[in-house]
Amino acid sequence: MSLALLLGVVNAACVNLRPPPKVLPREAAGPAPMQVWTARAGRRLTGQVAISQGSLYGAGVDRKVYAVDLQSGRVLWTHRLSGIVAGGVLLTGDTVYAGSSRPEGRVYALERGGGKRIWRSTTGPVSAPLAMAGGSLIVATQPGILVALDPATGEVRWRRRLGVARVAPLPIGEDAMVVATVDSLYRLMASDGSVTHRSASPGTLLSPWITFAGGLVAGTTDSQVVSIRPTDLGLNWSVRVDAPVLGSPAAAGDTIYAASRRGTLYRIEPGPPPRAVPIVQLDWPITSAVTIVRNQILLGGADGTIRALRPDGREIWRLQVWRPVEVSPLPLEDGILAIGGDGDIHRYRR
């Protein structure tokens, strides 16, 4: 065996070796929710996931789409795609949609009940989560082409070259959507792909928009949180923080909470002008979007820890899962669902 091949084998083994999460002492965990069950679904779920009718739907780095029963944690079905899954899954009605990047670049429609393939369509390598807008399935591809598919058949309705997008197109109104590429914002009609407005991007977006006070709010890689008008893509406001904001902010009442990659949690207070007030500086990188569940701010970190904070930044409790936490905790009626970085899924009850 050559040295290069030997090193490749050793490196691959090291990459796949993930130490188990540490057991937190009771005094560190605090009044954390009680674990009901833990399960495994592949190697790691990434991108957007969906919950519907007692099941979780997601996609992993092992090229598989999973359906998991929320009562027991049992994997109900899997479906393997021919390429690396890009952007997780989109669930609409009784259909689960998923797209692959390289080597083939296809979009798949699967039956929600059993995972059977309904259709697949070649679009080119997918670069962002899928979206549904104006009755079309919208696909952003790595060559920078936006593709609209018939969700029932997978047939292409139109294509539009815009630029590379990393964030799912956001539907606004009945037939419009906003698309953020690396350097521009576009407002398009979903029916035919025509562009009604275009503006320079206030910064590269890597996480989904949230709607707040009539605007679209997101964090950028150049350390800003911005709000734009969906009607004409004009800038409502922007505030600067201490590091890139890679996960989506969250809103509670008239306040936005955003976390920087450095680990600072900010409260963005309404203006004019809005102000970004640091609440707490944490000692670990935040790797998931901010989630607010029952007035608690949940943050997932690179160390595999999920922390619940009060609005003033004081910690309430923490949980330990496999690192890193890339998918935000999901609220359930009686607790939360936490997804770790090694295919581990945990259900907790309040």
Image (tube, rainbow, N blue to C red):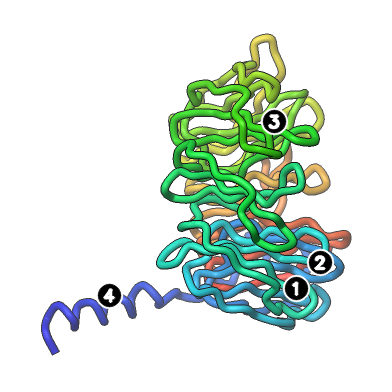
Q: Quadrant of residue 14?
A: bottom left
Q: Extreme top residue here?
A: 272
Could you say which is closer to the camera, residue 186 or residue 85? 186
- Image side of residue 149 versus residue 173, left or right: left
Looking at the image, which residue is at 57% across and 75% down?
64
Judging by the rendered image, the residue that carries numbered circle 2 is: 94
- Distance between the alpha carbons at the discs numbered 1 and 4: 38 Å
Tags 2 and 3 in contact by the CB under 8 Å rule?
Answer: no
- Distance between the alpha carbons at the discs numbered 2 and 3: 34 Å
- Distance between the alpha carbons at the discs numbered 2 and 4: 41 Å
Q: Quadrant of residue 12?
A: bottom left
Judging by the rendered image, the residue that carries numbered circle 3 is: 256
Looking at the image, which residue is at 48% across and 48% down?
285
Q: Amino acid at mark 1?
A: Glu
**Image location (x, y in percent) of residue 323:** 51, 64
Camera-near label (1 vs 4) is 1
- Image side of residue 22 versus residue 79, left or right: left
Judging by the rendered image, the residue that carries numbered circle 4 is: 11
Tags 2 and 4 in contact by the CB under 8 Å rule?
Answer: no
Judging by the rendered image, the residue that carries numbered circle 1 is: 111
Q: Amino acid at mark 2?
A: Asp
